[in-house]
Amino acid sequence: MYSADIIIEALINGLLTGAIYALVALGLTLVYGVLHIINFAHGALLAAAMFAVLLTNQVVGLDPYVQIPFLMVIFFALGYGLQRLVIGPASHGRDENILLVTLGLSIVIENLLLAGFGSDTRSLNTDYSFAVFEVGPYLLGQARVFGAGGALATAALLWLFLSRSDTGKAIRAVAKEKIGASLQGIDVAHVYAVTFGLGCACLAVAACLLLPTFYVNPKIGSAYVLVAFTIVVLGGMGSIVGAMLGGLIIGAVESMSGLFLGESLGQIGIFVIFILTLLLKPTGLFGAKA
Amino acid sequence: MRSSLRPYLPVLALGVLLALAPLLLTSNVALNFLAVTLIVSLAAQGWNLLGGFGGQFSFGHAAFFGVGAYSSAIWQMRFGLDAWTGLLVGTAMGAVTGLVIGFLAFRAGLRGSYFALVTLAFAEVFRVLANSSEVTGGAAGMLLPLKIGAGNLQFSDRATFLGLVVALTVLVLGLVQWIRGSRFGAQLVALRENEEAARALGVDVLAVKLKAIGLSGAITATAGVLYLQYFLFIDANIAFGTWISVEVLLAAIVGGLGTVLGPVVGALALHGLGELVKAAVGQLPGIDLAVYGAILVVAVAFLPGGLVGLARRRAAPRQVRKAEPEGGRA
């Protein structure tokens, strides 16, 4: 078959990609943990963020990594507005409705991107897109290494924010006990919107980290959304540690099944894990409750 | 006798209306529009039985649509058998697929978002498999050889094909209306409203859900076979694509969740609007779908009973309110 070096190199590259997947999943799991909703538009919003990065790069010439702070703020505001003005009011507080409203949003976003940019697959080439680090016998894509570093740093910052800041504490309080939190004077609707905004900000960072190596097209969101759902379900809905660990596992699995099963059949590995987790242990690795 | 036939009157009226269409319409564009819309509405009937009546929202009905289409295509092309039995085989395979997915998902206790996600994952698995397997023709898809003749379910004029689609649509409308009034239908609605209460009242929840997803899979698979016979071509992204999963739930929700006529009304309204939008903005790719998505949001926000519910609410003041003959979704 393959030599050990090839397998180990694929494994490392898979783990590096997995770290960025984990960041995408982090936004999803945060929203689930607090609002108890599945944001189906997560993938479409990621695609929108990736197009924003691409466009800014082409028009203004800003490097994707430099765009992170700006795009984060914009997507936070976008997410805040979406939850406050669209998802919250439209769904009348019913779970199925939220699922449908976010599905509707994802269709709108995806097809507006299609109408605006056409169905072509695009990519962004930077100086480091194809550069590699040589670590011993292994070649590691520089952009992947930067991406994984950025993803882990963002996750650490998010964790600090949630555990230390007042807003973070309010978010955790609402996640635990919504009514109790509102009795303490916490504005639940505001916290919901902030959480949704944070989820979108994670996407903005992920988009900046993804683009130097990954291509984008309007339909790319549905590929990422399934990967992100798999990670979230595997790690346990709402668990941040679970999302990080799940991301790394899925990155490795994707890379391995791609290596052994080929490009097109390789995607199966992820879906099979997804279905098996849902059927056998829907609470996942770190999930508290079903 | 008269009273037992009464619930079927709207179905009959719609059936007559639809049956007139192939006789009156001559333009190919109109015939094509109606054929495709009715095929989608048939698939949506399947979704509505499980999602609208039973409250189990599937995001992956493409799995059944595709299984129906591919089963019939394989039956005809790989085994050299005829299209009519292909229609039956496709329908049966849809039922089997429904039962298998249902058994796995419902026995594991999945509902709500979890059920939606697992059905989506199954559809994706099928799509990847169909895209890379030999027997399904891989990424190139399957092109049925052109053999015009009623025996091969291929017709030289669109009107005849439309007649077949109308016949099946009316048949399924009648079936769903019958289920609605049956004991099974009542059990299905009971578990949608409150699963625990239904169980406490002695409803075998797993059995009812399985029956529903089996029937649902069969109906949607029939639509898949019709799609194959109409276009004589399928590939993995058509048969197992998200477009059909989305269209069926959209048609059912916009038309009216858990109503018999909802899927047909919804599919006609959506596709009609889609054509209008295309006519207004020109062939901008995806613009009709963007409008569908916006409609889904608006329908969930403002139209809890769908278009059928809206019409019923409008008509309600004039009716003497007897015992609610059609208990739509509250």
Image (tube, coloured by chain):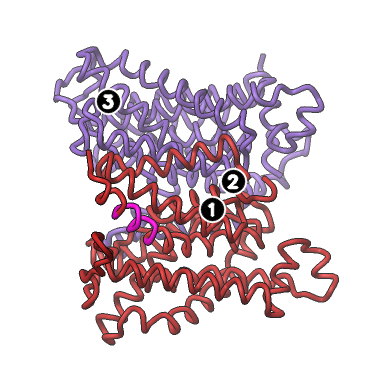
Chain colours: A red, B purple
Kind of residue at disc 3: Thr
Contact (CB < 8 A) between labels 1 and 2? Answer: yes
Residue beneath disc 2? A284
The image quadrant of residue A92 is bottom right
The reply to whether label 1 and label 2 mark residues of one chain is yes
One can see residue B268 in this view: no
Ranked by sequence position, the earlier of labels 1 and 2 is: 1
The image quadrant of residue B220 is top left
Residue beneath disc 1? A232
Q: Chain of mark 3?
A: B
Q: Chain of mark 2?
A: A
Contact (CB < 8 A) between labels 1 and 3? Answer: no
Residue beneath disc 3? B160
Give the CA distance from mark 2 to mark 3: 53 Å
The reply to whether label 2 and label 3 mark residues of one chain is no
Q: Secondary structure at mark 3?
A: helix
Kind of residue at disc 1: Val
Residue with the most extreme right position: A183
Kind of residue at disc 2: Gly
Q: Chain of mark 1?
A: A
Residue segment shown in magenta: A9-16
Q: Quadrant of the N terminus of chain A?
A: top left
One can see residue A37 in this view: yes
Where's residue B253, x and y in %? 54, 46
